[in-house]
Amino acid sequence: MRYLEEMRDHPTVDQIYKVLRRRLPSLSRTSVYNALSTLREAGLVRPFSMDGNETLYDANILDHGHFRCTHCGRIYDFDVKLPEAEQIELKGFKTYRRDVLLWGLCPICAEKPECENIKSIN
């Protein structure tokens, strides 16, 4: 939990494991999975995916959005006011979670000449 709170870089299980294994050589990947599962169940971390393949973990459990730079890959948090789930007309559905995911170029990459003609991703 301390790693997630300090780094705020939205790591995967493998990234967490590699960093913490340096400090705790006897740490197993299973222990990381189990700890993240416990933290998620306790409502202390929020798993999400930007590409549908890998799960990322976020210690910020308040409503906010995520922006991924398509050039450097960094993920940024941003504030967003989300409507209450009850305000969204989905009759018969029960909403458990709301996410806002955006892709584009971060301010640093947007200034790079090689990114000048990048408009979107497919």
Image (spheres, rainbow, N blue to C red):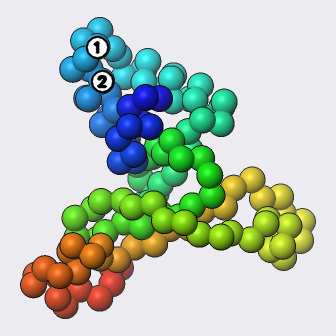
Residue nearest the viewer, comparing 5 with 65: 5
Would you say the residues marked 2 and 1 are in contact, meaning their CB atoms lie under 8 Å apart? yes
SS at badge 1? loop
Quote the CA–CA distance across marks 2 and 1. Answer: 6 Å
Q: Position of residue 107 (x, y in %)?
A: 27, 76
Q: Tell me if residue 84 comes above or below residue 36 in the rendering.
A: below
Q: Is residue 79 left or right of residue 13?
A: right
Quadrant (top left, top right, bottom left, bottom right) of the C terminus: bottom left
Q: Quadrant of residue 84?
A: bottom right
Please identify the quarter of the rendering in which residue 92 is found. bottom right
Q: Which of the labelled discs sits on residue 20, or is there none? A: 2
Q: How would you rate the neighbour count of disc 2 (Cα within 10 Å): few for under 14, some for 14-19, many for 20 or more?
A: some
Q: Which amino acid lies under the numbered mark 1 shown in the image of this protein?
A: Leu
**Can the viewer see residue 112 in this picture?**
yes
Q: Who's the residue at 37% across and 66% down the image?
A: 68
Is residue 56 depicted above or below 36 in this figure? below
Number of residues whose C-alpha sits closer than 10 Å to that of mark 1, classed few (under 14), some (14–19) or many (20 or more) = few
Q: Is residue 95 left or right of residue 1?
A: right
The residue that disc 1 covers is 24
Question: Horizontal and vertical percent for residue 102?
Answer: 46, 72
Report the label total. 2
Residue 27 position within the rendered picture, expressed as x and y whole percent measured from the top left: 33, 14
| Relative depth, front residue between 36 and 78 | 78
Q: Does 20 sit above or below residue 89?
A: above
